[in-house]
Image: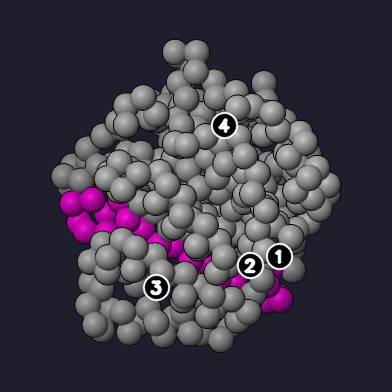
Amino acid sequence: MAEHYPRLRVPSLKGHFLLKEILTCTFFMRRSHAEISQCIQRALAHYLHAVGHHSLAFFDDHEGDWQPLDAQGWAIVQQELSNPRRAFVALEGAQDDPHGYRFNYQGKLLEAPFLENQPGAVSAVSFSLPTQYLEKHGPQRVRGLAMELATLLPFCSGHVGLSFNLGTGLTGVDDDLRKLYFRYPGIDVPNLDWLSLHVGTQVRGPSWLTFLGQPVLGELGGVAGLRAQLHTPGTSVQELDGDRAVVSLGEWPEAGDTEQGCVLPEYRELARVLEPWLFHEPQLHASTPLRDIRRWERRFLD
């Protein structure tokens, strides 16, 4: 819907879209893969039931290629998810729109020796949808799907909203892309591989739906304490099982547009409330100035 977010369609030489806006539902879990393997498999099955098995067509074979998700492909994916120690699974949609539908899971063995110096490491999962799905089925159905996925996962935090489909964060992007990132503050710049190594129990930032678990929700004073700090019309706080909650910012996910003066006041209010717990990049990327990273992280605060 044009009034809520822009149409971003930058084609690649291969014919599909190098850059576009999508919806991404992401959850971070301070749990090892063995503890959550069955939860992840149930959540994937639920996602596939909602979008159709045909929506995902390829899987990453960990050797630099994408292989078809035929019967043999699904067997390999199932074997990976059933691994007792760790699992890394990436599934994509059809070749003409590979990033419209996407499943990405980073299931770690948090006790592994190589993670001793990564105290922020978590297991993480994301489910992506094209914005056409949102427009066809409406925001309530998307919100319902996100809530159903949340009930299946022992998250510390999570978020659902608009994102760019590249999945590489601010690292290495050119100036034209960086301008888009700063122009539309409501569109996330995700990088699940990187975030799952560092985010810990911190919060990624305000999104259309922001899921909060422990310890952050407790430190905010629980649902009542959180609700008392949020006053923007359209913002709501819903209590969930397991001392968790979800903050909803309006009926639709919004991109904002700084060039048009649309700075998303409801997102800014939530950012101020969550500021002590917001995630910040722990180090400088050689290809991205630290000032750009900090500016993007504080886009709802400054």
Q: Are marks 2 and 1 in contact (CB under 8 Å)?
A: yes
**Left or right for 93, reference 271:** left
Vertical placement of residue 117 versus 139, above or below = below
Q: Helix, strand, or loop for circle 3?
A: helix
Q: CA distance from mark 2 to mark 1?
A: 9 Å
Q: Helix, strand, or loop for circle 4?
A: loop
Q: CA distance from mark 4 to mark 1?
A: 25 Å
Can residue 28 be spotted in the picture?
yes
Q: Which residue is mark 1?
A: 242
Q: Which residue is mark 3?
A: 45
Q: Which residue is mark 2?
A: 154
Vertical placement of residue 293 versus 14, above or below = above
**Residues drawn in magenta:** 89-115
Q: Are marks 2 and 3 in contact (CB under 8 Å)?
A: no
The tag earlier along the polypeptide, 4 or 1, is 4
- Give, as a three-letter code, the residue at label 1: Gly
Vertical placement of residue 233 versus 169, above or below = above
